[in-house]
Amino acid sequence: MKGSLIIVSFFVIGILCGVYHLIPFDFTQSKLSYYALGALMFCVGLSVGNDSQTLKKVRLLNPGLVFLPIMTILGTLAGTALVSIFLSNRSLTDCLAVGSGFGYYSLSSIFITEYKGSELGTIALLSNIIREVITLLFAPLLVKYFGNLAPISAGGATTMDTTLPIIARYSGQGFVIVSIFHGFIVDFSVPFLVILFCSI
């Protein structure tokens, strides 16, 4: 939990630095975050490669885990459909479009803004950021109370990049490959589902 709080603290500090222009550098035109993410992925790959037991553990995993991304997608859509009942000013398809971001805020919010307007696009952005932050903050508790797969499902499309280090730490190195596979499949579904629900 302490590690997650430190990561989120850095995120909040970054927001404050951006709002108050404390760092004289225009990050909006920079690929620095892309390179930082690349370095992070390299470190995760290095730690997986150094663990000779990881691939052996993956071979022993239940083949049924290939259905994990499908269940994440269906569970998220079911949850957003349920929430839409309590939001009288939003249609079912609006809620499903926002939920279909699965944490992929950069892509889904752009699509939703284009199809449905900036208000719903902003809601999608915040919703997906919150999903990622919840995964970062509560990964230890999710593992403790719901098992090693819980933070992977909670992370949605982020499990192949930003939430992967936290998942590797709390779920274990043996779940890294599952996490990457899960993130790839969920990530791949985002543009198709978002556009589908925005078009209905």
Image: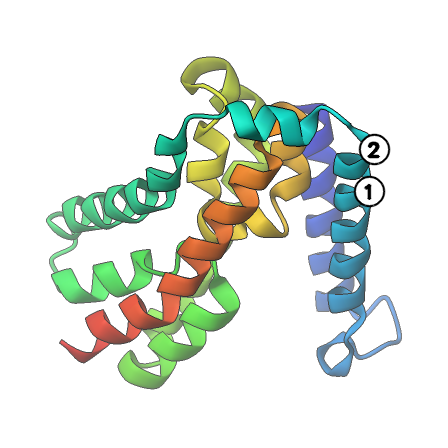
Q: Secondary structure at mark 2?
A: helix
**Callout 1 touching callout 2 (CB < 8 Å):** yes
Given residues 134 and 170, the one toward you in this image is 170
Q: Quadrant of residue 29?
A: bottom right
Amino acid type, residue under disc 2 in the picture: Asn
Identify the residue at horizontal 34%, vertical 75% (top origin).
112
What is the x, y in percent for residue 180?
56, 47
Q: Which residue position holds label 1?
A: 46
Q: Crowdedness of circle 1 by 10 Å Cα count: few (<14), some, many (20+)?
A: few
Q: Which residue position holds label 2?
A: 50
Residue 171 appearing in the image: no
Identify the residue at horizontal 73%, vertical 29% (top origin).
3
Say whether residue 117 is left or right of residue 142. left
Amino acid type, residue under disc 1 in the picture: Leu
Q: Crowdedness of circle 2 by 10 Å Cα count: few (<14), some, many (20+)?
A: few
Model colouring:
rainbow
Q: Secondary structure at mark 1?
A: helix
State how far apart marks 1 and 2 are (Cα): 6 Å
